[in-house]
DNA sequence: TTTGGTGTGGTCTGGA
DNA sequence: TCCAGACCACACC
């Protein structure tokens, strides 16, 4: 039979000594399908010594073919853990399946390599070590490559199709009966295929079915017990499962926690989703479910492979994986990829939903929940609260998964994997995919020692930041380079293999400013090449988007794709300088920043020559004071600059502002970099760097500073002073809600690793002594309370704080934050504290 | 181990 | 008691 399947998951399994890639997906009739592809075998490359003679090459090949090593079963699980369950083999004699000569590129050179194919993936590390270490082969080789690329990942690279696209499989369908007897998979269709290829259907798919779930728990006898669960699925399904009657209209009543787990599992499976969605399911919901299912001896949800869910290490994350219905943990993706662009103090579902959807969850603190449960009251509300969590998670998934899926397709990684990747891994995956397409050998990962060495090196110089002149400035035009770093890489052909090529030795072109290094002008390097493709892809996506209705499905799809392209492009520079990178090259990374400094400084001098005051600039931006006809003058300047810029480097017009404020540094001389506020003619205010945008300042101090900035930008300094005075009095009279005074700070390490005990660490230490568990990485909330001793001595987590210290909040929060802005107008601390003699306000407002 | 460097500012800490 | 430098967190780009 021949069948088209849309792929959402993959792994592999070994049956009777042969590896089969398992592709999970759905047919266009909506049936779940598994394809077993037995036509693919694992392999790695052996790089012969340079200048090796043909007869030596032949000897090497023969000696590789003769390799026999013993493997011990416990050691041969797939490195990524994403393999099947039948990998183990008892003290097998491991042999090479085949070795063949193959031409591949390393950098610009075409080289003859040996492709060594193994019988099953678990053999690869043994064969690699054997080739690398044995005397019969070691003397002929300069290295081994691509021995650590997981089997199912390589499959997608080599086959030329990606997850979340349609494939066409030709093969034999296994009957239901045989599936049950021999395989035990849970899918409508099971097919053994010898030929799987990209389908003409491309990657369009009419909607993924997602099922989100959420648990409510309470702690009893030091164990988390599940008291309620909710599920919300695409299409409107929404249920709360509970073993306490609560009168909630969407309730499924069960008898016990054990039955709750069983029902939750069966309900999710009955929904037959393409994806299971959680918010923090890896670390919480699935972890609790797993622990309770073991305690209560109740089987949990099983994947389409017929096996219960498994936890697999993905870097720091213990990922809960359900085969064939990939589990997407939105929190992971938000924390790793989206959070830099977000402003929420903490990444709770509530905050993130509020920021992304404009809708949070209502009420119910942990204590209220416990009260509701223990005293069996307000259970109806509790059920509603539980339901809301799943519904919000599902809504969030509708917004976020398109971005995950776009990254998945771009990098040819499974959606479950892509959703858990860091920027470095996303870039690396994309580069590996492109390398495979371009017949380029992938460089090895650095060893632990190499990483240490790279990290130990002195930092190289980064972007240029021009010191601003403190004060209120009028009539400002802001320019910035569009994607400066990637455009430099492309324009100057920055790549580890084009660096200092012999063919361009004496050319001045492409020489790195302030360095003897240069880049090839003849042959485009690999990194610039893949960036060019990304640029062109994004350009065409943006072009298409212009023709579409912004509310249409296609528009959102394309928008997600351009987001993925942008994400990978922008991370490429950082990847070059990343110690764990396969394509690490410090000289390249520092060349990029050297070019960047050169261009921004060139723009600054051109602006000065044109007679504009350069107020500020940071890495890729300049702020110019343009007195007359700001719009047309700015455009003219832009044109002049761009006429001079090489390649695809381009300056953009960012905007015009009526007024802007730069402040003084607290210590030392001059204006503070990276702190400013701007106001445009509509009255919109942009605030950068100030306490207002930092989470480790109290809300009251931040809000006060924001109002001060707004007033000052509207030339109403006097009112700003009065406002601060009023707030100082409010604190003094203790009229302020404690929540306004909490300070968020992340605990970045284990308590014992702190050399200096700051307030947040002190607060955590006290809480831990009281029995609370706080893990590194958590963001905690603390308040400074009354009493004696240092600030740290008086810091308490908000749940333990009985009062707040007005003195601290006035002197260390409100006044410094406000004064930061007001200082440039001559306002003093005493003015804000109401201590100053009533001196006139003359001299304020103008420098 | 989990993209890069630049920069500000709070609090602690230890020696004068 | 004062103060410089270290430590730490978090912003900008």
Image (cartoon, coloured by chain):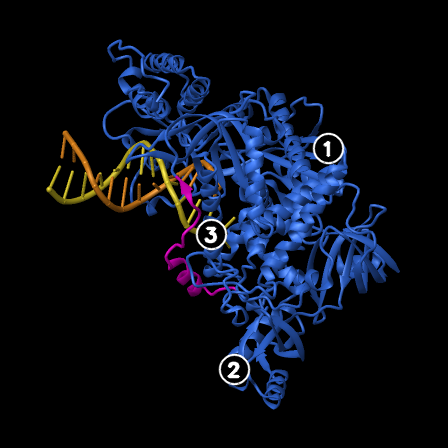
Chain colours: A blue, B yellow, C orange
* Quadrant containing the C terminus of chain A in the rendered view: top left
Q: Secondary structure at mark 1?
A: loop
Q: Gap between marks 1 and 3, in whole Å?
A: 36 Å
Sooner in the amino-acid sequence: mark 1 or mark 3 = 1
User: Which stretch did the figure color magenta?
Assistant: A445-466
Q: Residue furthest front?
A: A610
Q: In the structure shown, which secondary structural element does the residue marked by tag 2 occupy?
A: helix
Q: Is residue A457 above or below residue A440?
A: above
Respond whether the residues carrying marks 2 and 1 are from the same subunit.
yes
**Residue to which mark 1 is pinned:** A550
Mark yes or no: residue A309 visible.
no
Chain letter of disc 2? A
Q: Earlier in the sequence, mark 2 or mark 1?
A: 2
Mark 2 crowd level (few <14, some 14–19, many ≥20, 10 Å Cα): some
Residue at the spot x=46%, y=34% of the render? A612
Q: How many marks?
A: 3
Circles 2, 1 touching at the beta carbon (< 8 Å): no
Residue beneath the point at 47% across and 52% down: A593
The numbered dot on residue A562 is none
* Of pointers 3 and 2, the one earlier in the residue sequence: 2
Q: Which residue is mark 2?
A: A138
The residue singled out by tag 3 in the image is A593
């Amino acid at each position: 039979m021949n069948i088209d399947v849309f792929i959402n998951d993959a792994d592999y399994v070994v049956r009777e000594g042969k590896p089969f890639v398992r592709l999970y997906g759905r047919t266009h009739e909506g049936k779940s399908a598994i394809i077993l592809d037995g036509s693919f075998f694992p392999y790695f490359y052996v790089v012969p010594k340079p200048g090796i003679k043909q007869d030596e090459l032949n000897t090497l090949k023969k000696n590789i073919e003769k390799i026999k090593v013993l493997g011990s079963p416990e050691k041969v699980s797939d490195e990524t853990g994403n393999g099947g369950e039948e990998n183990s083999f008892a003290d097998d004699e491991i042999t090479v399946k085949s070795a063949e000569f193959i031409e591949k590129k390393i950098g610009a050179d075409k080289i003859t390599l040996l492709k060594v194919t193994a019988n099953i993936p678990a053999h690869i590390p043994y064969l690699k070590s054997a080739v690398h270490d044995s005397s019969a082969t070691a003397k002929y080789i300069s290295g081994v490559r691509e021995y650590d690329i997981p089997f199912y990942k390589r499959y997608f690279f080599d086959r030329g199709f990606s997850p979340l696209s349609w494939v066409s499989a030709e093969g034999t369908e296994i009957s239901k009966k045989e599936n049950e007897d021999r395989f035990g998979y849970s899918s409508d269709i099971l097919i053994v295929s010898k030929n799987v290829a990209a389908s003409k259907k491309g990657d369009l798919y009419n909607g993924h079915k997602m099922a989100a779930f959420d648990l409510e728990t309470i702690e009893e006898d030091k164990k988390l017990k599940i008291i309620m669960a909710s599920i919300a699925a695409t299409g409107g399904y929404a249920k709360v499962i509970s073993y306490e009657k609560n009168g909630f209209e969407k309730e499924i009543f069960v008898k016990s926690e054990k039955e709750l787990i069983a029902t939750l599992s069966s309900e999710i499976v009955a929904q037959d989703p393409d994806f299971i969605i959680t918010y923090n399911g890896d670390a919480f919901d699935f972890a609790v479910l797993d622990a309770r299912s073991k305690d209560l001896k109740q089987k949990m949800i099983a994947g389409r492979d017929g096996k219960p869910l498994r936890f697999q290490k993905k870097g720091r994350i213990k990922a809960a994986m359900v085969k064939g219905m990939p589990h997407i943990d939105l929190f992971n993706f938000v924390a790793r990829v989206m959070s830099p662009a977000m402003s929420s103090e903490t990444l709770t579902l509530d905050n993130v939903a509020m920021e992304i959807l404009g809708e949070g969850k209502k009420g119910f603190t942990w204590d209220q929940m416990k009260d509701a449960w223990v005293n069996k009251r307000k259970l109806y509300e509790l059920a509603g609260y539980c339901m809301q969590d799943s519904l919000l998670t599902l809504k969030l998934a509708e917004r976020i998964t398109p971005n995950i899926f776009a990254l998945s397709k771009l990098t040819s990684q499974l959606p479950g994997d892509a959703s858990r990747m860091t920027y470095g891994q996303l870039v690396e995956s994309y580069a590996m995919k492109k390398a495979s397409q371009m017949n380029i050998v992938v460089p090895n990962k650095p060893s632990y020692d190499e990483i240490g060495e790279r990290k130990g090196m002195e930092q190289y110089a980064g972007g240029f930041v021009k010191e601003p002149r403190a004060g209120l400035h009028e009539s400002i035009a802001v320019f910035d380079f569009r994607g400066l770093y990637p455009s430099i890489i492309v324009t100057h052909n920055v790549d580890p293999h084009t660096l200092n090529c012999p063919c361009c030795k004496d050319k001045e072109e492409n020489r790195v400013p302030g360095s003897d290094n240069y880049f090839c002008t003849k042959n485009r390097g690999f990194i610039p090449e893949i960036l060019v493709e990304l640029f062109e892809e994004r350009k065409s996506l943006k072009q298409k988007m212009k023709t579409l209705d912004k509310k249409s499905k296609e528009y959102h799809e394309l928008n997600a794709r351009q987001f993925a392209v942008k994400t990978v492009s922008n991370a490429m520079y950082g990847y070059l300088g990343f110690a764990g990178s396969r394509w690490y090259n410090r000289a390249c990374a520092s060349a990029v920043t050297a070019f960047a400094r050169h261009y921004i400084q060139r723009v600054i001098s051109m602006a000065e020559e044109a007679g504009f005051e350069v107020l500020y600039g940071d890495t890729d931006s300049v702020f110019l004071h343009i007195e007359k006809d700001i719009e047309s003058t700015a455009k003219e300047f832009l044109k002049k600059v761009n006429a001079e810029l090489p390649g695809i480097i381009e300056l953009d017009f960012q905007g015009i502002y009526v007024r802007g404020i730069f402040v003084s540094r607290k210590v030392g001389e001059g204006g503070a970099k990276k702190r400013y506020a701007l106001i445009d003619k509509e009255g919109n205010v942009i605030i950068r760097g100030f306490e207002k945008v930092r989470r480790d300042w109290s809300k009251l101090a931040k809000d006060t500073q924001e109002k001060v900035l707004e007033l000052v930008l509207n030339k109403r300094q006097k009112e700003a002073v009065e406002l601060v005075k009023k707030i100082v009095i409010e604190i003094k009279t203790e009229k302020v809600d404690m929540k306004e005074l909490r300070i968020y700070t992340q605990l970045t390490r284990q308590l014992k690793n702190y050399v200096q005990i700051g307030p947040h660490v002190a607060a955590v230490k006290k809480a831990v002594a009281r029995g609370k568990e706080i893990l590194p990485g958590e963001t905690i909330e603390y308040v400074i309370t009354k009493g004696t001793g240092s600030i740290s001595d008086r810091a308490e987590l908000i749940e333990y704080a009985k009062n707040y210290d007005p003195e601290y909040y006035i002197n260390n929060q409100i006044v410094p934050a406000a004064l930061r802005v007001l200082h440039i107008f001559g306002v003093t601390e005493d003015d804000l504290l109401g201590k100053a003699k009533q001196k006139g306000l003359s001299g304020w407002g103008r420098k």
